[in-house]
């Protein structure tokens, strides 16, 4: 990593899940000071927010909770509306209904404004195109477009970092291990759509993806 990053501050878009927690520790390794921003957007499992707060505290970084409940008021998703039954698989012709329309666009826009107010120019998000579940706002093209847009919107020079963009879930576990936080990520993060910390419920789409990656990583590691 270049000198400039090591001397800079970064803001991590943080949910307390596997991906953004791995990104938080990646940022702690690469930046002088790290801040987190967590959004309350009407997610069914508000336990997520307390998990995020606890991890931020443990990591010794600033934690800022931002209300973004309008996201679940204007768009529908099975992650925010208890009356919608969650898709277990990605439908052939569209996104699964766990997709929250506009979420990453709103998150990054708001995070950029917060960063600007605090003199921060590096944003970090845990999106991945490899395991993107069909979510269009996890793709590299969207992030590059968003980076240009926030720079134009505020006539500034932000850099959006996506350390997980080209990693699959097994490689994300490997990165957490290399960063020395494998156990923390495994036991203290919340990725499960049913709100269960650590290894989760085991059967929701998010748990299946996370656990398949974990098993793949552990079996690769044991053959070394
Ligand atoms: Zn689950």
Image (cartoon, grey):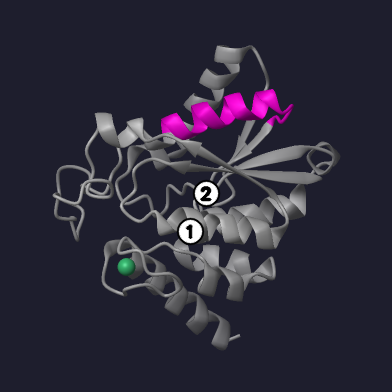
Q: Nearer the viewer, mark 2 or mark 1?
A: 1
Is residue 109 rendered to the left or right of residue 99?
right
- Secondary element under disc 1, as helix, strand or loop, is loop
**Observer-nearest residue: 199 or 81?**
81
Percent coordinates x, y for residue 212 in the rendering: 38, 73
Residue at screen point 33% across, 33% down: 71
Can residue 209 be seen here?
yes
Q: Is 165 on the left-hand or right-hand side of 11? A: left
In the rendered image, the vertical position of residue 22 relative to residue 5, given as above or below:
below
Image disc number at residue 219: none
Tell me if 11 is positioned left or right of 173 in this view: right
Q: Which residues are magenta?
A: 105-121
- Report which residue position mark 2 lands on: 126
Q: Position of residue 99 (x, y in %)?
A: 28, 44
Q: Splitting the image into 4 quarters, where does residue 208 fall?
A: bottom left
Residue 162 location, x and y as percent? 57, 44
Quarter placement of the C terminus = bottom right
Q: CA distance from mark 2 to mark 1?
A: 9 Å
| Residue 161 within the segment the image draws in magenta | no
Assign a secondary structure to mark 2.
loop
Mark 1 and mark 2 in contact (Cβ < 8 Å)?
Answer: yes
Q: Provide the residue designation for mark 1.
A: 17
Residue 65 falls in image quadrant: top right
Instruction: Tell me if residue 147 comes above or below residue 155 in the rendering.
Output: below
């Amino acid at each position: 990593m270049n000198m400039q990053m090591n001397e800079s501050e970064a803001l991590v878009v943080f949910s307390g899940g596997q991906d953004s927690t791995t990104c938080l520790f990646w940022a702690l390794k690469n930046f002088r000071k790290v801040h987190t921003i967590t959004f309350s957007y009407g997610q069914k499992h508000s336990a997520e927010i307390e998990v995020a707060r606890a991890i931020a505290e443990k990591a010794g970084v600033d934690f800022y909770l931002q209300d973004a409940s309008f996201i679940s008021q204007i768009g529908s998703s099975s992650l925010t509306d208890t009356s919608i039954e969650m898709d277990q698989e990605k439908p052939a012709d569209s996104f699964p209904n766990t997709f929250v329309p506009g979420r990453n666009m709103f998150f990054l826009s708001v995070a950029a404004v917060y960063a600007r107010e605090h003199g921060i120019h590096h944003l970090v998000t845990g999106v991945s195109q490899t395991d993107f579940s069909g979510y269009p706002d996890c793709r590299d093209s969207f992030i590059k477009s968003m980076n240009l847009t926030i720079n134009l919107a505020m006539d500034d020079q932000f850099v959006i970092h996506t350390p997980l963009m080209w990693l699959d879930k097994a490689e994300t576990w490997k990165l957490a291990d290399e960063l020395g936080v494998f156990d923390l990520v495994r036991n203290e993060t919340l990725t499960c759509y049913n709100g269960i910390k650590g290894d989760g419920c085991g059967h929701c789409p998010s748990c299946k993806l996370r656990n398949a990656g974990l098993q793949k990583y552990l079996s690769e590691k044991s053959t070394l």
